[in-house]
Amino acid sequence: MSLRSSPTPDLAPAGALRAPYVSVVVPVYNEEGNIKTLFDRLTAALDNLGKPFEILFVDDGSRDRSVEILIGLHRARPREVRVIELERNYGQHMAIMAAFEKARGEIVVTIDADLQNPPEEIGKLLAAIERGHDVVGGYRKNRQDSPFRRWSSLLINGVRAQTTGIEMRDQGCMLRAYRRDVVRRMVDSRESSTFIPALAQYYAINPAEIEVEHAARTVGASKYNLYRLIRLNFDLMTGFSLVPLQVFTLFGMGVSALSLLLVIYLAFRRLIIGPEAEGLFTLFGILYFLVGVGITGLGIVGEYVGRIYQEVRRRPRFAIKTVHERLDE
Ligand code: UDP
Ligand code: MG
């Protein structure tokens, strides 16, 4: 019996033939000055690899000319460039999720739009996937960010390693590659506040990490101010660990035990020495401190409750305004 008599994937209808080998996902939020250069370097790097690819740009509610420029790129290479426009700004991780839902590649790569991750490194990620890894994370060699960002990442990486049990060298590096089945599982999680590298690591069976170059941002500014950084890291901590709550409970128990000792001691003093008012301010000091701790604890509980509330409401995680793509022929 000849091989030709049974339908092999090669004989599948034209539509299926077009499924790319790699999908590159790029979240874009007000990056008008970076898109063109990124596109040129990215397509050069991907053309070099010689495998069919698609680039999925997600416009995360940009207010500059980003969308216009992206649509131009789609027109220039309609089969390789797909543009998803979100209704508003949902944050980098949800933007990536929107693209994950639509990615068709065997391998899905994420990369920032600001050229901090060199597109030329994608080949290295793909090679590691081809060696059998299902998730390949980059870690940044000579990270080119402000000292504040580097130190806070060091701190958060340490806390995350201690509390979530998720092992990763550089959680903030978004130059990463995933096998299709891992992406599928991430999409199926349907979490509305998540942290993609940690989620992938959670599903990975055979992850790997490789060193990648990092460049300073030359155009535009970081989209993460202190507030957004804190929000993002709360997503990471509450999404992957109950330790903050447990630490709090333990601390509460410790403080209660100590307070009990203090009360017993003060009661004895009252009996032996009689009434006294010295040390009142010290007591106030301790009290204010404990009130502060109590409010922080309520806040932490609130962070979890808020996220639970979001999940139970089951509102859509993001709304897509338009998709510019050409998948036919
Ligand atoms: N980004 C996004 N939505 C946001 C914030 C950022 O799509 O709400 C994109 C941004 O355009 C860039 C990537 O995510 O492509 C990384 O953002 P940024 O460079 O500001 O982060 P940093 O490098 O400072 O961590
Ligand atoms: Mg950046």
Image (cartoon, rainbow, N blue to C red):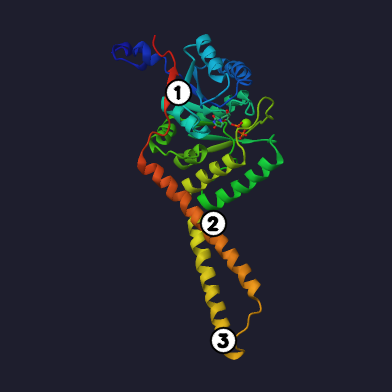
Please state the horizontal and vertical placement of residue 169, each as a whole percent of the image.
59, 42
- The answer as to whether callout 1 falls within 8 Å of ligand 1 is no
- Whether residue 3 is visible: yes
Q: Classify mark 2: helix, strand or loop.
A: helix
- Whether residue 169 is visible: no
Label 1 belongs to which residue? 105
Label 3 belongs to which residue? 268
Q: Classify mark 1: helix, strand or loop.
A: loop
Between marks 1 and 3, how big is the CA–CA gap?
74 Å
Q: Classify mark 3: helix, strand or loop.
A: helix
Q: Earlier in the sequence, mark 2 or mark 3?
A: 3
- The answer as to whether callout 2 falls within 8 Å of ligand 1 is no
Contact (Cβ within 8 Å) of mark 1 with mark 3: no
Q: Earlier in the sequence, mark 2 or mark 1?
A: 1
Between marks 2 and 1, how big is the CA–CA gap?
44 Å
Q: What is the three-letter code of the residue carrying label 1?
A: Gly
Marks 2, 1: nearer the viewer: 2
**Residue 19 picture quarter:** top left
Q: Quadrant of the C terminus?
A: top left
| Residue 49 disc label | none
Badge 2, how many Cα within 10 Å: few under 14, some, many 20+? Answer: few
Please state the horizontal and vertical placement of residue 30, each as a whole percent of the image.
58, 25
| Residue 296 disc label | 2
Query: Residue drawn 52% across and 38% down?
Result: 197
Q: Quadrant of the N terminus?
A: top left
Look at the picture and state if 210 lies above or below 306.
above
**Residue 141 picture quarter:** top right
Contact (Cβ within 8 Å) of mark 2 with mark 1: no
Relative to 69, 302 lies left or right: left
Relative to 192, 6 lies left or right: left
Look at the picture and state if 12 lies above or below 94.
above
Q: Nearer the viewer, residue 40 or 219?
A: 219
